[in-house]
Image (cartoon, rainbow, N blue to C red):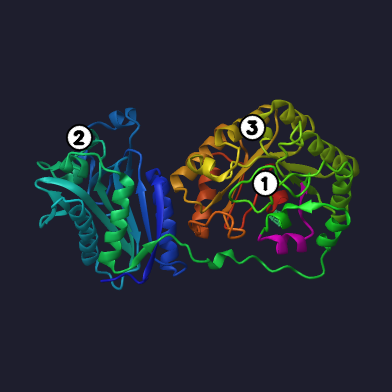
Amino acid sequence: MSPSSETIQLIRMGRVGYRHALRLMEQLAAARRRDEMGDTLLLVEHPPVLTMGCGGGVEDLRVTIGNLRNQGIDLIQTDRGGRMTYHGPGQLVAYPILKLPDDDLHTYAHRLEQVALEVLAGWGIAARRIRAHPGIWLGRDKIAAIGVAVQDRVTMHGLALNVNPNMAHFELIVPCGIAGRGVTSMCAALDRPLDMEAVEASFIVAFGHVFNCTVEPQRAAAPWLVAPAPQEGTIPVERLVSDLSLHTVCQEAACPNIGECWSHGTATFMLLGDLCTRHCRFCNISPGRPLPPDPNEPAHVAAAAARLGLRHVVLTSVARDDLPDGGAGHFAASIRAIRQRMPEATVEVLVPDFAGALPSLQIIADARPDVFNHNVETVERLSDRIRAKATYRRSLAVLTWARQRGLTTKSGLMLGMGETCGEVIDTMRDLRRAGCAILTIGQYLQPTAHQLDVVEHIHPLVFAWYRELALTLGFQAVAAGPLVRSSYHAEEVWLETSL
Ligand code: SF4
């Protein structure tokens, strides 16, 4: 039996809470049932949690609910088959979302077990099935648990393989409701530590083999990355910025939304020239030695914003580590010029980190922009590889500092650079701790062959899941989608904060 797709999209989630992962699984399965997406394999590790399948009951618990609560372990009822199961770090959990050729759940479950058997065999562990008990066994001990569900031929839930979980946590339950049998792990069987990523890699190979398909992240150009075409009869932004010797990040960063934004008469002005003193590996802006700041630029930006009739003006700049104030004074002068010319307009600044210099940040804070935006760009693990000079922790400190000065703060990150879902969620939490109110999440697109490769094209439904999740974490406004950029629909996003 093969699934309906020859290629199964792999989503490596990293460590994600059970409820969040379940929500994504449900949304992807619903989309699969509507044929809005292909087959998908989610690989995830959960923080400690107990889940109860349809066949389980409280009799499978060996401790009280209060005891579980004290240990910070949730108990969650699910709609899968089977009884009570423990999930936790060190356990590889696979949730295939496949459209089956028929409703034969038994054959599907058998195949899924076969994947675990092949993984274990590849690591030199001779495990087996036991007729009366689902799952995979090593002697009398279970090493992989299975619990699947199907609706309209689309599968949910899946298989949990014990790589190196905290075995003491299994003592909390009668695993899978089978008394008199135990639980074991790959590390216990081999009596040596194992690398989860290596086991995950072998699982992907075995899954492809058993289900006769290729399992990989979405890398090919995705249909959802086609930007809307520009509309006719709109203000010629290009001529306006060139007449006033201005730069826009829309052009310099090769933004995919330029057709849409410019045809609506919006643009993001880039102050302080078009050469940057840093060289981040994702960015299209040319590095080099910039010219001194143009003293006329603040007035020209204000004139252009007025001509375009902008109600919300977004300013950014290249990094100017060559200037004593990092260009902060120029930002402040531009904010003042806009306020003078357009008192009703709101101003959003997307600033560099000013190398963390408090006098520079104070200059920005004193100018009281309506939105103070500073991007973390990516998750902490990838930050040093992707950004030049800027650090993840310093960016969080800059945002915290701005928030403590009473500014509304905003930040953003690009996805598709090799981060896991868990890392994205951790970043959201860090940003919330920094007091950040507005979040943008978009897809990284390689501007030219000189910049970093795209590792993965994230599906729009995953972006929607991130948005929902970010709102539950307390962000007031979230824009998330493949083509979202820091300044995309900035006015609408800003207005959401006052709803
Ligand atoms: S999203 Fe921002 S940078 Fe891109 S075109 Fe629109 S205004 Fe310019």
Residue 192 rendering spot, x and y as whole percentages: 21, 39
Q: CA distance from mark 3 to mark 2?
A: 45 Å
Q: Is residue 52 left or right of residue 287?
A: left
Residue bearing mark 2: 171
Residue 151 rendering spot, x and y as whole percentages: 34, 64
**Three-letter amino acid code at the position of disc 3:** Val
Q: Which mark is on residue 178?
A: none
Q: Say if disc 1 is inside 8 Å of ligand 1.
A: no
Which of the two marks, 3 or 2, is nearer to us in this view? 3
The answer to which of marks 1 and 2 sits earlier in the sequence is 2
Residue bearing mark 1: 496
Q: Write down the region rendered in magenta.
A: 256-270
Residue bearing mark 3: 398
Q: Quadrant of ligand 1?
A: bottom right
Secondary structure, mark 1, is helix
CB of mark 3 within 8 Å of CB of mark 2? no
Q: Quadrant of the N terminus?
A: bottom left
On screen, 271 above or below 401? below
Which of the two marks, 1 or 2, is nearer to us in this view? 2
